[in-house]
Image (tube, rainbow, N blue to C red):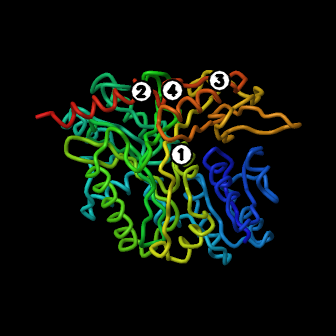
Amino acid sequence: MNILVVGGGGREHAITAALARSRKEPSLFAVMSKKNPGIAELCEDFLLSKETDVEKVVEFAVRKNIEIAVIGPEAPLSVGLADALENADISVAAPKKAVAQIEFNKGWARNFMKDNGIAGCPRFEVFTERGPMDSFIDELGDVAVKPAGLTGGKGVKVMGDQLPDLDAAKEYAASLLATGSVVVEENLKGEEFTLQAFVDGEHLAFMPTVQDHKRAFEGDLGPNTGGMGSYNDAGEILPFLVEEDVSQAKQIMLDTIRALRRVTGVGYRGALYGQFMITRAGPKVIEFNARFGDPEAMNVLSLLETDYTDVLSAIVMGTLDKLDVKFSRKATVCKYAVPAGYPDAPTSDREVSVGDIGDALLFYSSVYESDGKVYTTGSRAVAVVGVADTIAEAEKIAQHALDNLKGDLHSRRDIGTAGLIQRRIDHMRTIRNMQ
């Protein structure tokens, strides 16, 4: 089977690595904007091209007799790459544009949830003018502000954090109006977690819950990033969650998939990412993504026991309910090494070298290879993943590997540590006991 992976980051390296483990030994191909050495090593051939250049990607896929394509990043989804590939008679385990807008049009996504009575939707409004927007900010009193379009995980700002007061919230929201509509919503209080699922248009196969860490610096300080690392516990549920939290989140995602088909007439196929805030009132939806999270893909795909080629085939054929999708009951800790100064003033074009990483898995992200050496680009560079029976053991494996990456790099040492996880548990205990 010939399989195409579109994208050249850590998420796509994890996808490619999972496919390379297949007993069916598929022939792998890739399209990426820069040469990711980890992906290139696993592929029979690859094309260096913008992933949003639909014509070039489709031409390459046709020429290589691709049978199934997987699209990693959100940008190609937003320009309809899945539609174009299917029009060329290539099966695609990624959503078409009509349903992928649940990620790239956040205003549409919120109105979709409200109009279809989907649980977990916070109070919100979408604005194109400042006057009524300022009034709504005053009315809510504690808000999160986000541009309606794609932001790479860096466009959301919340009061009490990046926004010190109402005036700052109004000014930030007003600055976003220059580039499009703005979503203003209540500032949710609780702990974030990620629930992802394979989707075949109707059926969902859920993955273990994961917690990402967006903040750049230890102690959850500094600006938001695309994600500095993530972890999951052995089994399905994170230490600060209870089973009811996860079952409610699963129902929200199932209701969302059914409503998407009803509203758009298009079945959602691929991976669906639900980012939730577990609050005193249960799980609330922060956002949906129309693909795997990065770094969360590295956690869950490293645990996937079912042959990934079988999963992709079930997605495109609509038979996920006939496939027993299994994950190892292990804990994982993922830690990213990023360029110094990331995200505000990152260095770039600096060499990265990999020493003894022990038992850790390594995934290249926003790097490029030239003359046999690997260089940074200015975004997240290399991720390492520890897999073990406990979070503590997985963290030690990941940290050992991180210590043996050399270059002009920065990382968070606290991800997956007992102290940080206990803070999450204590915070959630406080939230649940609030009157």
Q: Which residue is mark 1?
A: 299
Residue positioned most to the left: 435
Residue 172 image point, x, y percent = 39, 31
Looking at the image, do the residues carrying marks 3 and 1 touch, with CB atoms under 8 Å apart?
A: no
Q: Which residue is mark 3?
A: 403
Q: Nearer the viewer, mark 2 or mark 1?
A: 2
Q: Earlier in the sequence, mark 2 or mark 3?
A: 3
Residue at position x 25%, y 36% in the image: 137
Q: Which residue is mark 4?
A: 216
Q: Is residue 365 visible?
A: no
Looking at the image, do the residues carrying marks 2 and 4 touch, with CB atoms under 8 Å apart?
A: no
At label 4, counting other C-alpha atoms closer than 10 Å, the crowd grade (few under 14, some 14-19, many 20 or more) is many
Q: Is residue 418 visible?
A: yes
Q: CA distance from mark 4 to mark 3?
A: 18 Å
**Count of marks placed on residues:** 4
* Dot 2 amino acid type: Ala
Looking at the image, do the residues carrying marks 2 and 3 touch, with CB atoms under 8 Å apart?
A: no
Residue at position x 21%, y 30% in the image: 430
Which disc is residue 418 wearing? 2
Residue 434 image point, x, y percent = 15, 33
Dot 1: what SS?
Answer: helix
Residues 204 and 222: in front is 204
Q: Nearer the viewer, mark 2 or mark 4?
A: 2
Q: CA distance from mark 3 to mark 1?
A: 19 Å
* Dot 4 amino acid type: Ala
